[in-house]
Image: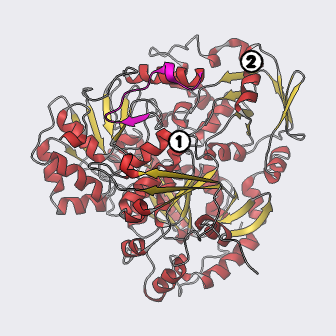
Amino acid sequence: MVTAPFTVVRSRAVPLLIPNVDTDVIIRVERMMSSDPDHLAKWAFESIRYDSSGAPREDFVLNDPEYVGSEILLAGDNFGCGSSREPAVWAVMGLGFRCVIAPSFGDIFAANCLTNGVLPVSLPADAAEQLAAGARRFEEITVDLPSQEIRLESRCWTFDIGRVHKLMLVDALDEMALAIRHLKTVERWEIRDHNERPWAWTQGRQAGMDLGEHSP
Amino acid sequence: MTLSPRTLVDKIWDRHVVEDMGDGWALLHIDRHLLHDLSGPGSLIDIKRRELGVGQPRQVLAIADHLVSTEPHRMAESSSVGSAMWAVLKEETDTAGIEVAGAEDPGQGIVHVAGPEQGFVLPGLTIICGDSHTCTNGALGALAFGVGSSQSAQALVTRVLLQQRPRQMRVTVTGTFGTATSAKDLALHLISTLGASAGVGYAIEYAGPVVTAMEIEQRLTLCNLTVELGAKFGLIAPDEKTLAWLEGRRLAPTGADWLEACAAWQSLHSEPGASFDREEQVDATGVDPMVTWGTSPEHAVPITGTVPLPSDAANSDQARSWSEAQDYMGVAGGKSLIGTPIDWVFIGSCANSRLSDLRAASEIVRGQRVPDEVTAWVVPGSEQVRREAEKEGLDRVFVEAGFAWRRSGCSLCVAANGDRVPSGARCVSTSNRNFVGRQGPGARTHLASPVTAAAAAIAGRLVDPRQI
Ligand code: SF4
């Protein structure tokens, strides 16, 4: 669920440039039974963030105090691949990130980011490397959604985002609310479909439809 | 007016656009919806909290799979983790009027095994589930994809989702499979050669003579692993085999509806000349039994091959991830995997737990014996698969060889129900993910086909199944 509008974010960025970080690594299955952001943040990336005794690994970038308060995560190729678990996005949010930049994302993870008001930005690998170099020097990165730009010092990269998602992020609109606005059109589509493809409906040709029963 | 030739995906997509939102985005109608016990309760609670209702409950099927116990005499309460989630799933689906199956029901199974098996999944439909392996269902010619729990909640209420038309890739498979080689090996071969992110943003259609020749269960396996290639959709055009497989299943259409459906499905294929954004060709003749050495499904090699050396990686990030994976797995670059002693074998998961998988594995273990130091499990993909296998006596073949024969569920594929491979133990698994800790914290997973896993169970070490 989207909580705050997204316009411009400027902060240090955490360079976590490991390829194929899967959502099992982002949050283990047994930590998902609670959706409390603090709980999820505590256990985020646990298999690479803590050692076998449970102590934070000093060489792991998320444990570096220099990055406390960062709102931007710089990730490797195919970040968030694997399971569709939405708590992976909630864990990333729980750590304070509002934007993730990577050469590519797991498709479902990227969709889950957008649903939750987190901006996933795909940039070519060379841009990601330049940003990472800056991030390692603790330079601040600017993510400007209205102008669809990422800026670091004098360099600037543009990125793509669908028009509808841009509007939803900027205005903190919820996808559910958007779809509900179209419910009448959906109902008309379904009535027509029920005649054209009766086989597609489990209740078959004869039974009535449940349309409108729970119209919000 | 002449229309340019359309692909299978184009045809299903265009049929389901309720509202065009511009730039290739659309509100896409979702025909059917599967719920499971891990992600389903959250979606249903979300709806309740917003004081909304489920719009088309009869188009939804809920099954407990991730968190159920797989013990032989299980009940709903046998899984301490699962029973609370099951209680929510049961209560909320009952309130909404959604059919639900739990640990004690004959229709229970892994959603992507039981959904097709019960005729809930049909060609030409759009289907979602809060689960990334929903792409499995594309094997029947459906546009099926995984979503998060928020989008699942949205679709339960509104039956539409905001979706972007995917880029399209066709993978054409020619040649013939060699001995002891199957769809699982083909999938691991594709992931290891194309890479785990090759499919990001794509829908992948599998085609060609090998795919046409495949039985439906093998097609389900192939489509299952599509998400490990990075794509959220994988599909195969329905054909006579698909229709024969579906006819008479519990929820499949009947009578006039069935005939009408079959007529509609005739045109569900990519037309000659339809264009794809990317085309890949693969010759199945050159595919060997595959096994993974690392912690991504792309870390796969032929069983006769060697683990790659980090010094041969394409760049420093890959080199580092290879050496970390090798440390985690306790394998060495440059070495063969054959002969590596193993501790566990898991035959199960929505990748490979259907009747034909169990039959293939049983042929290897019949009359053989698993060494004492190896724990070997068979977890059928559904209760129907279990009953059918028991009718054929497969349970006895496995049990006499020293395997545990369990009840259906996700079990060791995701280790969410209490079933776990111990830390440091090495498991040959027919599942689809070898991620760090996937089978339990510290567990080491080698993905393989049912035949390769069965051969390893008998040998107590990784072996070439063709040598058995
Ligand atoms: S068997 Fe494994 S991959 Fe399949 S649905 Fe269950 S947890 Fe997911």
Cβ of mark 1 under 8 Å from ligand 1: the answer is: no
State the image coordinates of residue B122 (x, y, percent, origin top left).
Answer: 49, 70
Please name the residue that numbered disc 1 is placed on: B194
Q: Secondary structure at mark 2?
A: helix
Is any part of residue A96 visible from this angle? no
The residue shown at (11%, 46%) is B400
Cβ of mark 2 under 8 Å from ligand 1: the answer is: no
Q: Which of the numbered marks, if any, corresponds to residue A133?
A: 2
Q: Secondary structure at mark 1?
A: helix
The residue shown at (54%, 69%) is B59
**A193 and B81: which is toward the camera:** A193
- Residue B7 placement: quadrant: bottom right
- Residue B426 placement: quadrant: top left
Chain identifier of the residue bearing label 2 in the image: A
Which residue type carries mark 1?
Leu
Q: Is residue A81 above or below residue B100?
A: above
Q: Is residue B392 magenta?
A: no
State the image coordinates of residue B196 (x, y, percent, origin top left).
Answer: 53, 39
Residue segment shown in magenta = B300-315
- Residue B430 placement: quadrant: top left
**B391 and B292: which is toward the camera:** B292
The N terminus of chain B sits in image quarter:
bottom right
The C terminus of chain B sits in image quarter:
top left
Which residue type carries mark 2?
Ala
State the image coordinates of residue A99 (x, y, percent, origin top left).
Answer: 75, 34
